[in-house]
Image: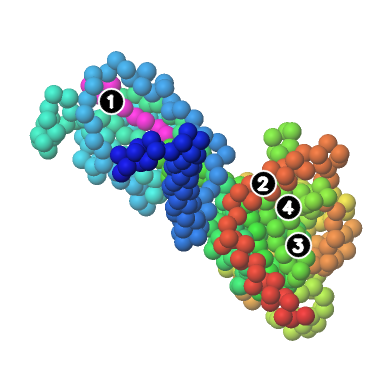
Amino acid sequence: METSETHALEELQPHEEAALLAQQTRRRRARFRFTLAAFAGLVMMSWLAGQLLLPDMPTPVLSAKPAPSEPALAARWASLVPMQRTHQSDSLVAGDSLAALLARAGIDGVEADAALDALRTEFDPRKLKVGQKVRIFSEWPNNISANKTSEDSLKRFAGFDFIPEPRQRLVVRRTGHLDFDVVKQERPLSERFFFTDTLISSSVYEAARGGGMSPNLVVELIRLFSFSIDFQRDMREGDQLEVLFTRRFDENNQLAEEGEIVFAALTNRGKRYAYWRLAHDDGTHGYYDDEGRSVQRLLMKTPVDGARLSSRFGMRRHPILGYTRLHRGLDFAAPRGTPIYAAGNGTIVALGRNGDYGKYIRLRHRNGYETAYAHMNGYARRLKKGARVKQGQVIGYVGSTGLATGPHLHYEVLRHKKPVNPRDLEVPAQRSLADEGLDKLRMAQTAIGSRINALATDDNRLHSLPRQSAAASQQ
């Protein structure tokens, strides 16, 4: 082929030869561009297939990188002879102790006592709770092969470690004959953000739990909205819940502790209640609406979680006495022992038995308000008349003392000694932000909005569609 083309070129005039060469060059370039375009097209098709066919997986965003491991641990024991180590794990059971756990693992009593004595210099083992996991270590010399370690004579008790709190590990290590050392090791945790956007079908609690929130964080969420929403009367199926919250993980990507609610919004009967978390200069924090008003009010409407309203405020026929008289508060039916919270910051002005009310507490608050709590099963520890309590602090437990047909809380609100309906309370916000605080709130809202957009997925957005269409169908 090349020979025939050469002969042809020799027979052509110079200008015709140049034209033919240019044409061949254009063809080569065209073939190259076509090959490059085809390759790029294949790459693009592969990427699109992955995006369209594979399911979306919401990826939590890390807000902090894990800190480097604690170097002091290795430096402190650098002079020890290197040993091979292995461990076994066990957990404390009801009625158990750390000494019993070590004995159960076959540790010699004298060695266990020496290790526990070292631990007591930094931590009281009696504070360990049921379920606490403990790793027990054994060690043997480096020059012994691993397949011989089944012989008890080759191994010795090397110590143990456990995690008493999420950010700390306690390590007890053997340093010699019946000598043990203890070190507190800080655990670096990474914080991650999670976002849930879900419809409420039965309760806020079930919706939040279905969105991945822990029970403790759900209780916090309910308390957050309890100042604005009456969960007994206001909630409707199809209301929408949105929450941005955090969790903290250890270096092994294991959940170490729950974090905080950063943003929460509840759309109830078409009205949206939204609150943002804002840090204060004194190290505390609060939740604020878009206008900078604190979500916290002087008093809570419902000072008990998960209760059912069993009797309203007003005239009623008494279920035991049989005649009609003014019911001065609200009754909330709940299981015996359910915690009762102080409805607001205040001072205890009465604590003890009070006739038909049974075990009773009355608190005095600002602006002439008082709250009373009756038929209690018992009081929280270390409470006494004259003591100050904080809003949300547990002050007692639901019971049926006094004149009561079953376990419930009788809750009263008084304004200048006159009873008022707790459901009709319209008390001001505890705090409102000034200009500087509003600027900080706007910055926090922007950052939180960006975080939510980063975490939101197609699946999240679809959650709100049934609510919108259902609302439209009812109009």
- Cβ atoms at labels 1 and 4 below 8 Å apart: no
Q: Is residue 11 left or right of residue 283?
A: left
Residue labelled with disc 4: 275
Q: Earlier in the sequence, mark 4 or mark 2?
A: 4
Give the secondary structure at mark 1.
strand
Q: Residues within 10 Å of mark 4 (few under 14, many from 20)?
A: many
Residue 167 is covered by the magenta coloring: yes
**Boundaries of the magenta span:** 166-178
Q: Which mark is residue 272?
A: 3
Q: Earlier in the sequence, mark 1 or mark 2?
A: 1
Main SS class of the magenta portion in the image: strand
Q: Name the residue furthest top.
A: 79
Count of marks, rendered view: 4
Residue labelled with disc 1: 174
Q: Locate residue 361, reporting x and y percent.
A: 72, 57
Give the secondary structure at mark 2.
helix
Q: CA distance from mark 3 to mark 1?
A: 60 Å
Q: Locate residue 242, reporting x and y percent.
A: 65, 59
Q: CA distance from mark 4 to mark 3?
A: 10 Å
Q: Locate residue 270, reporting x and y percent.
A: 76, 69
Q: Residues within 10 Å of mark 1 (few under 14, many from 20)?
A: many
Quarter holding the C terminus is bottom right
Q: Amino acid at mark 3?
A: Arg
> Residue drawn 69% across and 49% down?
449
Give the secondary structure at mark 3.
strand
Q: Nearer the viewer, mark 3 or mark 1?
A: 3
Q: Residues within 10 Å of mark 2 (few under 14, many from 20)?
A: few
Q: Earlier in the sequence, mark 3 or mark 2?
A: 3
- Cβ atoms at labels 3 and 2 below 8 Å apart: no
Q: Quadrant of residue 323?
A: bottom right
> Residue drawn 26% across and 38% down?
87
